[in-house]
Image: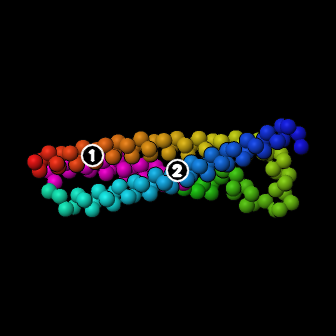
């Protein structure tokens, strides 16, 4: 195998590993967001809520829901094409080798675009989670200040 072929296979494996790492991070963040939402509901329903605390808390919850939506969008399967998977499903076993040999560079490029899109969505979801968490902390401070 040539150096270019080995480098191309290494690049292909690296991109696939990045997609897997991003999906793992997405799953962890989605679980965290769900736990924060559930915890917020459990705590908030037993507290005397002031209007400012409700407004700020609802903004935080909205941010967390938006983050969850982005996370779900990031891991949603794309069976419509562009990711390589539907192509493999349509080929006969003897055709796959020829397509891989011919189109490995194109597959690396396509998978790289998927990885960047997933990473960008994950980054936005992390930002929304931080903003939502800050709003919930502010709401808790407003409740604590109002109760004192």
Residue 120 horizontal side relative to residue 52, left or right: right
> Which residue is drawn at the image coordinates 84% and 54% (left, top)?
97
Q: Is residue 68 magenta?
A: yes
Q: Is residue 74 magenta?
A: yes
Q: Secondary structure at mark 2?
A: helix
| Rendering coords of residue 7 (x, y %) | 79, 39
> Which residue is drawn at the image coordinates 62% and 48% (left, top)?
19
Residue 56 in view in this figure: no
Q: Secondary structure at mark 1?
A: helix
Residue 94 in view in this figure: yes
Residue 21 horizontal side relative to residue 88, left or right: left
Residue 4 horizontal side relative to residue 77, left or right: right
In which image quadrant can residue 87 be found? bottom right
What's the image's color scheme? Answer: rainbow
> Which residue position is annotated with label 2?
25
> Which residue position is annotated with label 1?
137
Query: Which comes sooner in the sequence, label 2 or label 1?
Result: 2
Stretch in magenta: 49-75
**Which one is in front, 103 or 31?**
31
For the residue carrying disc 2, how many other residues have a C-alpha within 10 Å: few (<14), some (14-19), or many (20+)? some
Q: CA distance from mark 2 to mark 1?
A: 24 Å
**Which one is in front, 100 or 57?**
57
Where is 68 relative to 93, above or below? Answer: above
In which image quadrant can residue 111 be found? top right
For the residue carrying disc 1, how many other residues have a C-alpha within 10 Å: few (<14), some (14-19), or many (20+)? some
Q: How many marks?
A: 2
| Rendering coords of residue 137 (x, y %) | 27, 46
Which residue sits furthest left?
148
Q: What is the magenta segment's predominant secondary structure?
A: helix
| Rendering coords of residue 29 (x, y %) | 46, 52
> Which residue is drawn at the image coordinates 17% and 49% (left, top)?
143
């Amino acid at each position: 195998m040539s150096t270019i072929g080995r480098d191309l296979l290494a690049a292909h494996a690296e991109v696939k590993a990045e997609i897997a790492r991003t999906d793992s991070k997405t799953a962890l963040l989605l679980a965290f967001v769900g736990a924060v939402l559930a915890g917020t509901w459990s705590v908030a329903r037993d507290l005397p809520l002031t209007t400012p605390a409700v407004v700020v808390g609802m903004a935080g919850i909205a941010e967390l829901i938006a983050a969850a939506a982005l996370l779900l969008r990031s891991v949603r399967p794309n069976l419509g094409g562009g990711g390589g998977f539907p192509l493999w499903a349509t080929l006969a076993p003897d055709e796959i080798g020829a397509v891989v040999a011919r189109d490995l560079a194109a597959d690396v490029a396509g998978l790289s675009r998927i990885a960047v899109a997933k990473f960008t969505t994950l980054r936005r979801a992390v930002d929304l989670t931080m903003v939502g968490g800050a709003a919930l902390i502010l709401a808790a401070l407003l409740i604590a200040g109002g109760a004192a």
